[in-house]
Image (cartoon, rainbow, N blue to C red):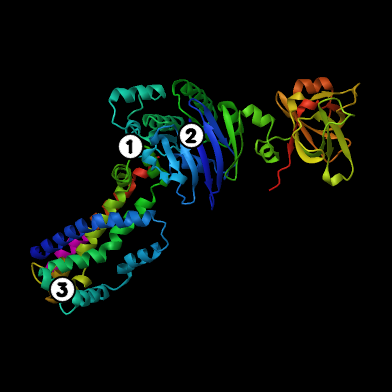
Amino acid sequence: MLEVLLNNEGPIRLQAEFNCARGELLALVGPSGSGKTSVLRAIAGLLKSHGLRGRVSVGNKAQDLWFDSARGIRRAPQQRRVGLVFQHYALFPHLTAIENVALAAHPPREAAYFDALFERVGLVGLQQRRPSQLSGGQQQRVALARALAREPQVLLLDEPFSAVDAPTRQTLYHELAALRQSVAIPMVLVTHDLNEARRLADRVVILDAGESLQVGPPARVFASPRNARVAELVGLQNHFQGQFFSSSPADAPGLGRLVWHAPEQGGAHISLSVTDKKRLDDGAAVSWVVAGELLDLSAQPPVQPANSLACTLREVLPLGEISLCTLVPTQLPSQRITLNLSTAALRQLGAVPGGVLYLHIPPEAVHIMPVRHN
Amino acid sequence: MDWQAARVSLLLAVCTAALLLPLGVWLARWLATTPWRGRPGVEALLMLPLLLPPTVVGFYLLVTLGQGSAIGAWLARSINLRLVFSFEGLLLASVLVNLPFMVQPLQRAFAAIPGSLREAAWVCGLSPWRAFWKIELPLAWPGLVAGVALTMAHTLGEFGVVLMVGGSIAGETKTLSIAIYDRVQAFDMAAAHVMALALVGCSLAALAFVFAADKARPLQER
């Protein structure tokens, strides 16, 4: 189990805490400059900062404690068995593929070991090539083989798919999935690509300005961001402001009320029934998101008007099978709801830009977050 | 052709390059990687021999190392070493004057190695020393070739410092460039021609070598 707790003040601010079990793939996600690579470098022992505090350990034995500022332990990169795949691979340009890989094997290994390793990463026959004679995908595999030859206790991948073309990336995704079946060590992947994280990782860590804001399975983090900043970072489009009122006798049991207002529109508002998880104070200012897949759209006014709003279809952007639709609630014309609808469904609705549609927002589709005060 | 002078010149060139190579590699690597703020000062000091007239360098060496000076007197007394008008003194002067010729190309070569390669070597478990031998030095190879070639060519052609510090003692400090000057003074143009041509050939060969090595840059193989 990799356990990481890092605190650093100064130009590279870090305040990150997470762990990663054996066989687990953890993705560090965040915009550029959010400290993802710095966290990875700190784990590998490459981050040079006198102010770095915290603890990095990969097990319970004495040699598994790599960094502990409280006890003055700071192992050199050479003393940490880390497999690190650098963003641009950092292959040694003057050495052949097999020499690159052999350099990381301690103690030195027989040729048969490397043959097996090259076969495992799909590089048979390319042992004697220089990095310049290999494609981007092949270079990435050499970098991976070199990381594995170190027989690492942790595998760290720094944006490993950013420098390859899309088809190669798909192949490499599959290979990473296959690798996870055979290597039972913690794996930490740094990526700015949310879809990549969603697709590959068991859990994600959302990083912002060096701080880990939320850790959890991708589905949960993306559907229930802990706060407005996480919602913004994971790219949730339908993100609004409002005020939450807890369950009152007038509401159905377990439901509270969300008053959706637009600051710039004075008193205009829409009131929605939402699930009351009893975590928020009555009258709290909140930000909230809606899960697009739980919304209903109809051309006719609903029989039950609760939680339904009339909207103008402002814009339709056809993207092949799906169309990107922008809806504007008639009561709050400054707000925009963006939905991905199947182009076929849109045709069946007979919706045209400028027409009116009725949007139903079930209580469970609304995720409410406290507004974060810094 | 003054073969004795040619022998002194060649010996001086080889010894200068041999002494300067380890020193130059160490200095260049340090300059290429140090975050120290005083670095430009050190760089300026190293480049100084390029700008100063050789007579100035020679003059100060004479003043510091001559037997009238404290250092010169101490050296003569304790280890019987005379650094003025001797081959040893000439060698020391040559090493100092050639510092920029060795350090400059090496520093550029070390600075061109991406930091990630150094770090990759450490993460692979290589000690800093092994990383230097296995990764950094092979990648800085063209800089090394250039440094040695330029130092040797420049030593062969050095005149002012040699004359000031070494004088013109046949078989000891009289180099080819001094011999050419002597021959011209004696109106022996034919002998001067031969030696001058030999020096032109050496310099040209050294420069061709530098450019050829630069073309085969291992770092460009990416």
Residue stretch in magenta: B191-201
Q: Quadrant of residue A196?
A: top right
Q: Position of residue A317 (x, y in %)?
A: 75, 31
Q: Which one is closest to the eye, mark 2 or mark 1?
A: 2
Left or right of B186? Residue B208 is right
Answer yes or no: do the residues labelled 3 and 2 have beta carbons within 8 Å?
A: no
Answer yes or no: do the residues labelled 1 and 3 have beta carbons within 8 Å?
A: no
**Amino acid residing under circle 3:** Trp
Q: Which residue is mark 2?
A: A157
Residue B67 within the magenta-colored segment of the rendering: no
Q: Quadrant of the C terminus of chain B?
A: top left
Q: Is residue B95 above or below residue A137?
A: below
Helix, strand or loop at mark 2: strand
Helix, strand or loop at mark 1: loop
The residues bearing labels 3 and 2 have C-alpha atoms spaced at a distance of 61 Å
Q: Position of residue B113 (x, y in %)?
A: 38, 47
Left or right of B205? Residue A6 is right
